[in-house]
């Protein structure tokens, strides 16, 4: 019984460590990189966020929106023909940090 508890604890620790490492770092620089990356959407149409929002045009107040994740995903799916990004990922959080920088 004790060996089983130790094994379960070891697996839990490994999963926790893996998820922390996979989370990545969150930064405006990473957000800017993603904002300009056509691979974020569908690489076939080669559009990026900056295709419609050069230098953050039109996003000056977007960072104040409580539904920013939903707005970003809407653009990714409809305009860029890509896939949604989970709001908890470092990628989405970095995009949000970068977009919020347009408010300044």
Image (tube, rainbow, N blue to C red):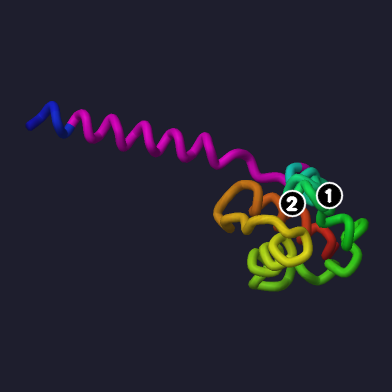
The C terminus - image quarter: bottom right
Q: Looking at the image, which residue is at 22% across and 35% down?
A: 8
Q: Residue furthest left?
A: 1
Disc 2 is placed on an element classified as: loop
What percent of the width, then of the height, locates residue 51? 89, 57
Q: Is residue 38 above or below residue 53?
A: above
- Mark 2 neighbour class, 10 Å CA radius: few under 14, some 14 to 19, many 20 or more: some
Q: Residue 24 sits in which quadrant?
A: top right
Q: On the rendered structure, is 102 left or right of 18?
A: right
Q: Looking at the image, which residue is at 73% across and 71% down?
A: 64
Q: Looking at the image, which residue is at 73% across and 53% down?
A: 41
Gap between marks 2 and 1 measured at Cα: 7 Å
What percent of the width, then of the height, locates residue 85? 62, 55
Q: Is residue 75 visible?
A: yes
- Looking at the rendering, the stretch of residues picked out in magenta corresponds to 6-29
- Mark 1 neighbour class, 10 Å CA radius: few under 14, some 14 to 19, many 20 or more: some
What percent of the width, then of the height, locates residue 65? 70, 73
Disc 1 is placed on an element classified as: loop
The residue identified by callout 2 is 42
Q: Is residue 87 above or below residue 65?
A: above
Residue 18 counted in the magenta span: yes
The residue identified by callout 1 is 46
């Amino acid at each position: 019984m004790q060996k089983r508890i130790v094994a379960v604890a070891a697996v839990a620790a490994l999963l926790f460590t893996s998820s922390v490492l996979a989370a990545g770092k969150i930064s405006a620089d990473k957000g800017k990189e993603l904002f300009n990356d056509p691979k974020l959407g569908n690489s076939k149409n080669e559009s990026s966020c900056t295709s419609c929002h050069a230098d953050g045009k039109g996003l000056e107040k977007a960072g104040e929106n409580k539904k920013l994740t939903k707005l970003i995903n809407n653009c990714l799916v409809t305009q860029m023909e890509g896939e949604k990004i989970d709001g908890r990922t470092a990628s989405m959080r970095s995009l949000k940090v970068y977009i919020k920088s347009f408010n300044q």
